[in-house]
Image (cartoon, rainbow, N blue to C red):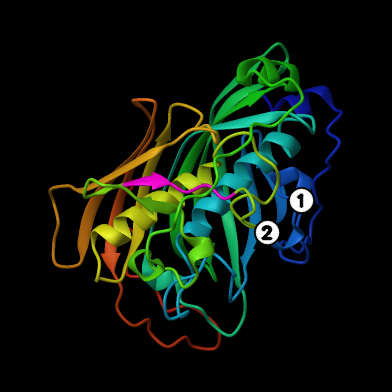
Amino acid sequence: MPPIAALAGDNPYPGPGSGYDFHERTVSRHLVHRATVAEVFITGWQATGPYDFLLGAQWPRSHGFYRLPGDDRHDPLLLAETIRQAGLLLGHVGFGVPRGYHFALNDLSYTLDLAGLTIGTEPASLMLRVACQDVRMRDGRLGSLRILVEAERDGRPVGRGSGHLSVIDPGSYDRLRGLDGTMPVPLAPGAPTTPELVGRDHSSDVVLTPARQPGTWLLRTDARHPVLFDRPADHAPGMLVLEAARQAARQLRHPDQVVPVEVITSFSRYIELDRPCLVRAWLEPGADARRVPVRVTLEQEGRIAADCRLLTESLAPAPAPSAGNPPPGSGLPIAS
């Protein structure tokens, strides 16, 4: 079955023609559910088959939040956010999901090679080959789908990932969330843990509050954060969950400088902003000299709301870029 937009012939977002520049401008911020144009990373798209698409994406040389110590590599979580935006975009332009509908992120994963993240003299321009699977329709509209993403930079593999999203119409979403036109009042952000322990320069970017038990924290949700809360939300955004997992893993492995080169995250419940959420982290078996697996769970009212498995790699100095291009990758880890 073709995408519903092609089947109905009324797709309000027609695709580009031949000769299209995938990196000339960003797509509409509304298509990736961002309020700030600067936070839009998808720069173009084209259908290559009924369920296959080619997308352009671009990462800035320096980002105010998604950045690594030393500023010589792009932050791996940029790939996670790019995959998330790709799923939203294709829901709208590929399957005709109307504006105002909600998307629930059920899981998100990626694996990448740090060699492909070297920051050069130009922004990182990516090409994403996206395949849609497990496409389910409900009452003539998209109900859910999984996207599989292969990311390339200058023709070289950077990483791969996947995400599963469900689509919810506005009325059903309000009933599901018990919303009556008002947003929940978030808890006041707790005192942040020491920024350098979680690889941050500023306390405003810390999303963990110390707890009494070792390896545990409270999720610190600051609804004023300009990136994690780019627009109003009635629950903790998925990228806040990934950032909390990254910071917990970073503190667990302190003083090592580590980054998540592989992440597998499942979301089973909405994380409410008006009640505490416990973050737990521990090392898992299988560590070697540079790569250590870490497990992180986010729990609310005694139930696991999100489960994250991270493979953390110790940072070594990035190789010097050549003419703005990344060095050849040494091969991607096997996708989980």
* Amino acid on which disc 1 is placed: Arg
Residue 304 appears left or right of 62: left
Segment tinted magenta in the rendering:
217-222
State which tag comes first along the sequence, 1 or 2. Answer: 1
Is mark 1 in CB contact (under 8 Å) with mark 2? yes
Q: CA distance from mark 1 to mark 2?
A: 8 Å
Mark 2 burial class by Cα count in 10 Å: few <14, some 14-19, many 20+ = some
Residue 218, magenta (yes or no): yes
- Asked whether 162 or 218 is in front, the reply is 218
Residue 164 appears left or right of 264: right
Query: Circle 2 is placed at which residue position?
Result: 39
Residue pictured at 51% horizontal, 78% vertical: 119
**In this rendering, is residue 236 above or below 190?**
above
Residue 138 appears left or right of 133: right
Image coords of residue 190 (percent x, y): 47, 50
Image coords of residue 295 (percent x, y): 26, 45
Residue 123, magenta (yes or no): no
Query: Circle 1 is placed at which residue position?
Result: 29
Image coords of residue 226 (percent x, y): 65, 58
**In this rendering, is residue 3 above or below 128?**
above
Quarter the N terminus occupies: top right
Residue pictured at 66% horizontal, 33% vertical: 50
Determine the secondary structure under disc 2.
Answer: helix
Q: Quadrant of residue 292?
A: bottom left
Q: Which mark is residue 122?
A: none
Image coords of residue 6 (percent x, y): 77, 29
* Amino acid on which disc 2 is placed: Glu
